[in-house]
Image (cartoon, rainbow, N blue to C red):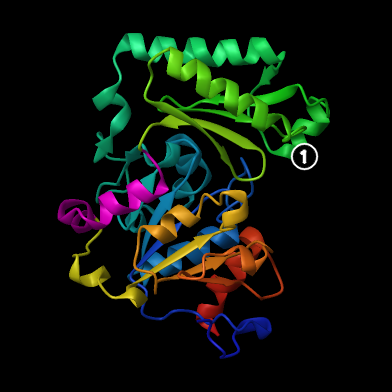
Amino acid sequence: MTSSVQGRDGASVRWNRRVRLVLADVDETIAGLYEPASPAMLRALGRFLGDGGRLFLITGGSLQRVTSGITDGIPRVMRRGVLVAPVSGAEVWGFTTRGAVRRRPFVSRYEETFTPDMKRRWRAVSAQVLAEFGLRPHAVRPPARFHREVGHDPLDVMVDDRGSQITFEFVNGRDLRVAVVERAAELLREARLPVTPRLASVFALNMTIEGVSKESAVRQVLESDAILASVGLTSADVAAPHALEVWGDDFSAANGGSDLLMSRAVAPAVRSIDFRDEDPTDFPAELNIVLWDGAQRLHDGLLEYLESRRA
């Protein structure tokens, strides 16, 4: 299903000129992990939005990570074309016509579902997991900086309480995640909490609200006339496969690719572009997933693709 027409730098994946709404992962797709998007990326996204494109950012990260690292760098007038589903889709946020984050989210499963006691029990489970495995929690930061400032001991992990999601980043020992996720699942069941621990990306473990995912977030937006209207779209605008596109870096079914969930929420013919070097035999055959084959990868590859619009 890939295009055979040569694009910028010899890439065969050509810019989709008919796309209206892009569904995009954030970390290592738009920007480096826990790093802001580059000025060049922000300019390219601003041009895309200025030309009438719309952007739905779907991430395991927090809303603050997206605003401070990405949308704050986009001109205010352009932000009204952006939607954000942080914390693995537990929430969906938009922007006002003046470019400020709306006072309330369109969706918030956390506040709708969790009582104060449930929130307390969730934090108790997180603390117990850390204690049982002897893990030492640290604030999140880019991995290279973590290695410089903390070291390489597998028991040193980054922990980020995002409200409706608690994330452990095993930057030094991702193999530990399997044992930790199994124990976390046991403790969450015992605490009678509707929370599911999941492996994500290269070394993350996310404790996420049950039933919430990147897939559910995409479906909620595409099925809501009100949310689509907030960015100037109608359901008819995004009905055709070419009107949508998925950008990510984690589509391998063999590794439980989190970005596959976005692809599964749309028609199989919608094109998903993988900006990481993954084995295409691990992609579900029924989905239209293509590897970016330009000179760069990850967020640098996406920037290359965005800049191909001007070629």
Q: Residue at image x 79%, y 24%?
A: 150
Q: Residue at x 43, y 49 (%)?
A: 58
Would you place residue 249 above or below residue 112 in this image?
below
Where residue 18 sits in the image (x, y, percent)? Answer: 36, 79
Q: Residue furthest bottom?
A: 5
Occupied quadrant, residue 282: bottom right
What range is drawn magenta here? 212-230
Direction from residue 55 to residue 1 in the image, left or right: right
Give the percent coordinates (x, y) of residue 253. Answer: 57, 56
Secondary structure category for the residue under label 1: helix
| Residue that badge 1 annotates | 144
Tell me residue 300's x, y (percent): 65, 63
Toward the viewer: 305 or 78?
305
Q: Is residue 221 magenta?
A: yes
Q: Nearer the viewer, residue 38 or 198?
A: 198
Q: Look at label 1 and name its amino acid.
A: Ala
- Residue neighbourhood size for the residue with mark 1, other residues' Cα within 10 Å, grouped as few (<14), some (14–19), many (≥20): few
Q: Name the residue rendered at 42%, 24% in the picture.
A: 163
Asked if residue 222 is positioned above or below residue 269 in the image, the reply reads: above
Q: Give the quadrant of the C terminus.
A: bottom right
Position of 111 with respect to 138 (left or right) is left
